[in-house]
Image (cartoon, rainbow, N blue to C red):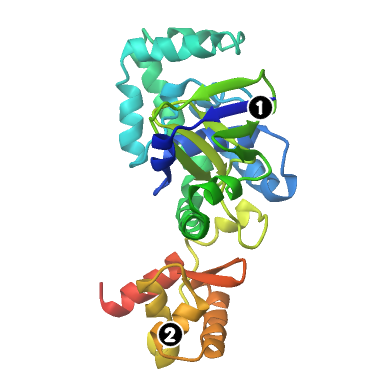
Amino acid sequence: MVYRIHFTVQDLARTRVAEEPMPLHELELAARALQSRSQPARLDAWRHRARAQLSPQARMALALMPAVGYSPSFISPVQVGPVEELLEHVRSAPRERVRASLLEIAHSRPLLPAWAHRLADDSTLLAELCTGLSHLYACLLAPYWAQFTERLTVDRTLRLQQFLTGGVEQLLTQANPQWMRWRPPVLEIRMVGGADRDLHLNGKGFLLVPSMFCTRAIVTAGQPVAVSYPVFLDKGPRELIALASVPGQARPSGALTLLGRTRTAVLATIAEHQGCSTKELAARAGIAPASASEHATVLRQAGLIRSLRHRNSVQHSLTSLGLGLLNISDGS
């Protein structure tokens, strides 16, 4: 089964990659992953901890976001912003939009919870649903949000490199080759189920959305049309439960003075030129490429930078730990 997205010249010109995470959209994908049986090695520990923490309101929200199938679009907008602000938009959504959103999925989900059909007319029930979404976010995403933001930065570095070397064609070809195939001027999305479908962008543009929890390709037919794909993991699958320890871990003992003058300069150079290659790093820091590679290895092992290999080069970006170390040393 294939979802065919038809591009015009205007759509190609308006194709872009999301600059920031989209909390409620990512929450829907996390809710799907929670209920799925895929990726046991990477996700089972996270699922076990999350399920033990779910409140009754969170389970209520979860009932609207199945592992496979459609969810009401009004609860998971493809938008950036603070999660509290986005939840307020959901809470104040016009009744007509809520009703239309539920009707859109009624044919594919005939067994929606009975209470869901009252959401358009019961503001108290809608408020309770929003409370559930908030609880679900705190349980599924909040502990990992900083790490996801870091990985989004790494992924954007790779997509920028693809765009610079091969334009939109390479971007669409390599973003998610397992599930997406670019046959100009049509992007084919392999679907798990459902009939073949065609969608014409008609100049409204196209958005690629990197996701921590997406395991294939998810089409969101909004304006612009968006397709979520798995964020690039430079070291392969990891258990999300291990990521939870990162936000609270102690910073390396000592300050920048203990790194040494050259290594500190390398760290500062990466901070100023996120995504720079080892060759660029060496030139900007005024050191030999071999020395730049050696210093980058030490900084990466210390958790201060993240390195991404793409073709014959390696790009380096600061982690939140590295940024925090620089900010502390600058007195900010």
Going from the N terminus, do you reach mark 1 or mark 2 first? 1
Distance of mark 1 from mark 2, alpha carbons?
Answer: 47 Å
Image quadrant occupied by the C terminus: bottom left
Image quadrant occupied by the N terminus: top right
Residue 32, quarter of the rendered image:
top right
Residue 259 visible somewhere in the drawing = no
Q: Is residue 222 above or below residue 147?
A: above
Q: Secondary structure at mark 2?
A: helix
Observer-nearest residue: 203 or 268? 203
Residue 309, given in percent of the width and then of the height, sits at: 60, 67
Q: Is residue 320 above or below residue 264?
A: above
Q: Which mark is residue 283?
A: 2
Identity, as a three-letter code, of the amino acid under mark 2: Ala
Q: Relative to 175, is 238 on the left or the right?
A: right
Q: Is residue 151 above or below residue 22?
A: below
Residue 311, given in percent of the width and then of the height, sits at: 62, 66
Residue at x 43% of width, y 25% of height: 75
Q: Secondary structure at mark 1?
A: strand
Q: Is residue 328 above or below residue 109?
A: below
Residue 139, given in percent of the width and then of the height, sits at: 51, 41
Q: Which residue is mark 1?
A: 2
Number of marks present in the image shown: 2
Residue at x 34% of width, y 33% of height: 86
Observer-nearest residue: 227 or 161? 161
Q: Which mark is residue 28?
A: none
Identity, as a three-letter code, of the amino acid under mark 1: Val
Q: Relative to 54, is 221 on the left or the right?
A: left
Residue 70, quarter of the rendered image:
top right
- In the rendered image, the residue lying farthest to the left is 332
Residue at x 68% of width, y 33% of height: 36
